[in-house]
Structures are given as C-alpha cells and as structure tokens.
Image (tube, rainbow, N blue to C red):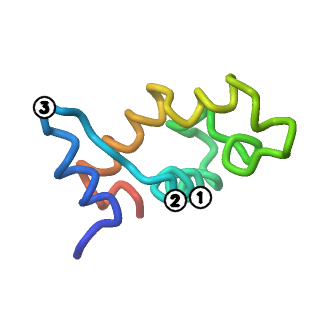
Amino acid sequence: MTSQWSNYNSIADSPQGCCATFKDIVDLYNLESTMSLKKTHRLNPSVLHPKSIEKTSVKLATAVVSESTRDALRYYAQDPDKTA
C-alpha cells in the first residue's frame, strides 16, 4: 500500500532538505481536523484559506512553515499506518 506521504519521506532524508506541496499541508490539516490532539496545532482554516486582508499576516504565513507542521509531515511519512 502506497502512502500519500511516501514522496515526502523519500525526500525528507536528503541533505538539501525536504519539500512538500501546499496540497500536502492541506491533506495533513484534513487528516488531523477530526482529532482531539493535533501535531499541527498551528494550522487552521485561516492559514489555509486566508481572506484578502489576512494574506498579509506573517503569523498565518509562518504557521504553514512551522516546526510543528514539518514534524507532523515527517511523523506521518515514517509510518502510513499512523493515518488510519
């Protein structure tokens, strides 16, 4: 079974760093949206779909590239069964 995070996992160990698409961030938010305890506690609808004036907010922009988001992507990439 191929995980939706498998592409991220293969890149995560590269010395140049890693990459994830915005769709990966949205998928991650959707996965955790029903959980009571979230690894991506800084992601919320305003971060993913900002209104016109919110697009200039540094706080919202940094939530996408926060350590918690990065760590959650790595966490789910390591074991696809964690998403079930």
Determine which quarter of the picture holds residue 37: top right
Q: Categorize mark 3 by other alpha carbons within 10 Å: few (<14), some (14-19), many (20+).
A: few
Say which quadrant the N terminus sits in. Answer: bottom left
Residue lying at the far bottom of the rendered structure: 1
Q: Secondary structure at mark 3?
A: loop
Q: Residue at x 41, y 40 (%)?
A: 72
Q: Is residue 50 left or right of residue 84?
A: right
Reading the image, the residue beneath label 2 is: 27
The vertical placement of 3 against 20, above or below, is: below
| Mark identifier at residue 76 | none
Reading the image, the residue beneath label 3 is: 15
Q: Categorize mark 2 by other alpha carbons within 10 Å: few (<14), some (14-19), many (20+).
A: some
Q: Categorize mark 1 by other alpha carbons within 10 Å: few (<14), some (14-19), many (20+).
A: few
Q: Residues at badges 1 and 2 in contact (C-beta under 8 Å)?
A: yes
Q: Secondary structure at mark 1?
A: helix
Reading the image, the residue beneath label 1 is: 30
Q: Residue at x 40, y 35 (%)?
A: 70
Q: Is residue 43 left or right of residue 51?
A: left
Q: Residue 2 location in percent, x, y?
A: 24, 72
State the separation of the CA atoms marked 3 and 2: 25 Å
Q: Residue at x 60, y 50 (%)?
A: 35
Point out the frontmost of discs 3 and 2: 3
Q: Amino acid at mark 3?
A: Pro
The vertical placement of 24 against 67, above or below, is: below
Q: Residue 9 location in percent, x, y?
A: 22, 50
Q: Residues at badges 3 and 1 in contact (C-beta under 8 Å)?
A: no
Q: Amino acid at mark 2?
A: Asp
Q: Is residue 13 left or right of residue 31?
A: left
